[in-house]
Amino acid sequence: MDDLRDAAAALAEARRVVVFTGAGISAESGVPTFRDALTGLWERFDAQALATPQAFADDPDLVWGWYEWRRTVIDQVRPNPGHVAVATIEAHVPHTVVVTQNVDDLHERGGSSAPVHLHGSLFTPRCAGCARPAPAGTGAEPEQGRRLAPPRCAHCAGPIRPGVVWFGEALPEEALETAVQEATDCDVLLTVGTSGLVYPAAEIPKVAAMFGHTVIQVNPRPTPLDEVATLNLRGPAATLLPALVEAAWPVS
Ligand code: BJW
Ligand code: ZN
């Protein structure tokens, strides 16, 4: 595949790399993508409607139950060869920054040193009232499709909320600034497994393209980012990322 060879050559020459990831990189670990997240007993809900401050205010038990259930799913799965390939890129190109929209911890468990989480994490709950961090996983055991009352803050008795960024909320300032800066200064930006529909995160590959850097996209399906990508590699991340790494730095 010529595009794979060209992508590998660009990666092998790069001094600064940004790996920008979305839910697709975790799909082959068994984590449903955001737009597929409401399977089984959750399927009558709308993910985009649940991931809002208004949904949590209206029905905290429903929203907390959904997030706690998703956290237990993540705890039961493992990083896949795509996550490991990302860590291998970091080993070959020391100035690699992983910028993820994912709220799971599979990059960390796959060996990435300090992924930048643009949309927060399922593992950093905090008080919805006073914003103090709260311990993760100390509430009742969640079950699929079940409401679960959020624990109460030890300081102000406010409800504990997931440490994620909902629609209408600002992204963590430092994470967004780092992502924009790294996309501005990189040689190659590799965008993996994102629909490119959610802003401002979807601007990150566009920033790299605007500055004339090589943008490589890995996704089995077309996305709005196709037009800014220099090279579009169509296929699943757990197969294509290891193939890309092997082509860039062959193990003889
Ligand atoms: C595979 C694969 C395999 C499958 N291998 N690939 C500009 C224009 C229009 C709208 C806006 C705008 N700016 C802001 C907005 C509004 C809004 C927005 O973007 N709305 C759009 C829906 C139109 N944005 C916001 O509200 C943001 N906040 C904001 O702008 O605040 C302004 C503000 C400033 C100052 C003060 C106050 C406010 C916040 C956005 C937060 C998004 N959060 C979520 C939820 C996190 C918690 C949770 O998980 O529940 O983040 S939404 C959801 O989407 C989640 C994801 O990180 C994010 C992106 O999804 P992702 O990762 O792309 O997943 P999918 O499922 O969409 O796609 C998966 C892809 O994988 C597909 O392409 C598959 O083909 C592929 N795939 N298998 C590789 N094996
Ligand atoms: Zn509190």
Image: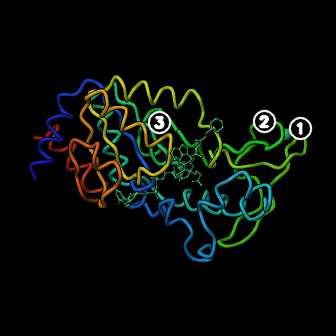
Q: What residue is pinned by disc 1?
A: 155
List the single residue furthest toward the right: 156
**Amino acid type, residue under disc 3 in the picture:** Pro
- Could you tell me residue 214's position as x and y percent? 24, 34
Q: What residue is pinned by disc 2?
A: 132
Q: What residue is pinned by disc 3?
A: 115
Q: Residues within 10 Å of mark 3 (few under 14, many from 20)?
A: many
Q: Indicate which disc, 1 or 2, sits on the residue closer to the N terminus.
A: 2
**Which residue is pictured at 41% across the width and 50% down the height?**
196
Cβ of disc 1 within 8 Å of ligand 2?
yes
Q: Indicate which disc, 1 or 3, sits on the residue closer to the N terminus.
A: 3
**Which residue is pictured at 31% across the width and 55% down the height?**
219
- Alpha-carbon span between mark 1 and mark 3: 30 Å
Secondary element at tag 2? loop
Q: Residues within 10 Å of mark 1 (few under 14, many from 20)?
A: few
Q: Quadrant of the C terminus?
A: top left
**Amino acid type, residue under disc 2 in the picture:** Arg
Q: How is the image coloured?
A: rainbow
Cβ of disc 2 within 8 Å of ligand 2?
yes
- Could you tell me residue 215's position as x and y percent? 27, 38
- Alpha-carbon span between mark 2 and mark 3: 22 Å
Vertical placement of residue 201 versus 69, above or below:
above
Side (left or right) of 98 relative to 168: left
Total count of labels:
3
- Alpha-carbon span between mark 1 and mark 2: 8 Å
- Could you tell me residue 226's position as x and y percent? 28, 50
**Amino acid type, residue under disc 1 in the picture:** His
Q: Indicate which disc, 2 or 3, sits on the residue closer to the N terminus.
A: 3
Q: Name the one closer to the observer, 155 or 178.
A: 178
Secondary element at tag 3? loop
Evaluate if marks 1 and 2 touch, with contact meaning CB atoms under 8 Å apart. yes
